[in-house]
Amino acid sequence: MLKCIAYFNALVFPVLLSVSCGREETVAFRPLDLVETAVSDTASPAAACLRGYADLGNAGAIAVFGGFEETAVLAEKLLTCDKFDNIDAKERPDGLPDFSGETVMPVFDAVNAPYTDYMAAANEDFIRELAVKGFLSMISGHCASSAFDHGSSASKPRAKMVIFSSSVMSEFGIHDIDCLTAAAGISTGVLDPVTSAVKHVFRHADTLSNIGVWAESNVVSSGVYGNVFRDIRSACWDRHSHEYRDWARTSEIVCLSPEPGSDAGESVRRFFDAYLSADYHTPLSGVILDDFTRSSEVDSLNAALDGILMSETRESEIYRQLIVPGFRFISPVETLAEDCYRWLRENGRFTHLVALPGMSGYMTVVSSEVQGGYLDKDGWLDPEFKYNRAPGSGVETFRFIPLSQSYFSDAAMERMKELAPETYKRLIYVY
């Protein structure tokens, strides 16, 4: 573990960002103490999560961890998508879900999400700790049975793949988890939405171009897209890398937050007009639609853009100059599902069971040790306490338990039913 920490201490991550993508700063990275504890203190709960993982094989679940809506949307995608032929892995539907025989395990972080407010409180290290704790819980074979269970007495599937549904956690926590998996020598797959989507656009671009991001202002100001883009672009500068692009050095990522239009055509126009208004003229190779709840809009946005470009108006000519061949709006929901499929295939981790995908749901709840004065009227953490919790305190303010409908409002359940109907049927609906 000391080697791991020394290696990361030697790295410096200078944040190079477009004006619209966040802050500019230089930060030296050092893994959390929790990471060192997990691999060096065999008596710690963190180490217990790692113990025996090497024997997992192909039997583990595909875990999705993050806030309520984005986790529901991504779990639904994994449950229902059919983009690949399950025999030869070619990109063609075959009438069978891509993840047939697998168990999809959504874990709704009801206690700690949303995560951008930790940044407003200058408490980014707590996001990192949440990500690592979430990862350790996903790969563990146990969880608490209730908010009062101190001993993690309930059994749960271990995860062979952990997917974070939060864009913010793409930056805060992923480096810690990379260090943890390397030091512990475990073969868990780990995916995050920003890395997945940005790499997807880079892979499909073959000429000088920028990457656009359509995200809410708090995600833009977090700087996460700029930070991740910088790391990926650096790899593309290396002439010895198979990802080398001779034009990558001058490529930029441009994060914008225009309001969606009343229809797909108006939404397309609003994004490109915002791009021009920000004084950008380099063509775009793609636009990442960050909001998971809008993932279903991607096809209509692309169809609307094709319609606009086919017309002979001056507006269409201006827009044609802003894109390169192959340009598309994309959603991280799509790219994460693709990356998950390819990782399982390339690493021989599919179960190969002939069955529809299964599902097992979990969530976070407020620990019974939290005093009433730190709770709001609904029994969740008061925001002032929630976003200012100190990382590394040793006080457990939340626990992972099997999903319980009783913790969610009727409105939340209706929202799940709207966003992820099959997930709702599997986890909530009683026949």
Image: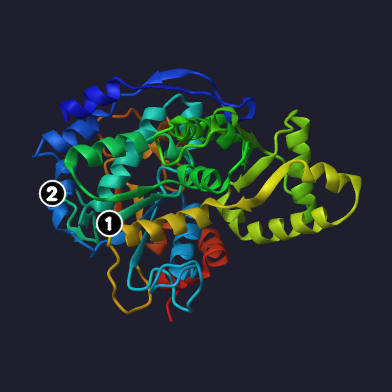
Position of the C terminus, as image quadrant, is: bottom left
Q: Nearer the viewer, mark 1 or mark 2?
A: 1
Name the quadrant containing residue 179.
top left
Quickly name the residue at label 1: 160
Crowd class of label 2 (few under 14; some 14 to 19; many from 20; radius 10 Å): some
Indicate the amino acid at tag 2: Arg
Spot occupied by residue 24 in the image (x, y as percentages of width and height): 53, 20
Residue 310: % across, % down: 83, 57
Q: Residues within 10 Å of mark 1 (few under 14, many from 20)?
A: many
The spot of residue 211 in percent (x, y) is 61, 39
Q: Quadrant of the N terminus?
A: top left
- Residue 212 to residue 10: above or below: below
Q: Is residue 367 visible?
A: no
Q: Which residue is mark 2?
A: 51
Camera-side residue: 207 or 383? 207
Mark 1: amino acid: Lys
At numbered mark 2, what does the secondary structure look like: helix, strand or loop? Answer: loop
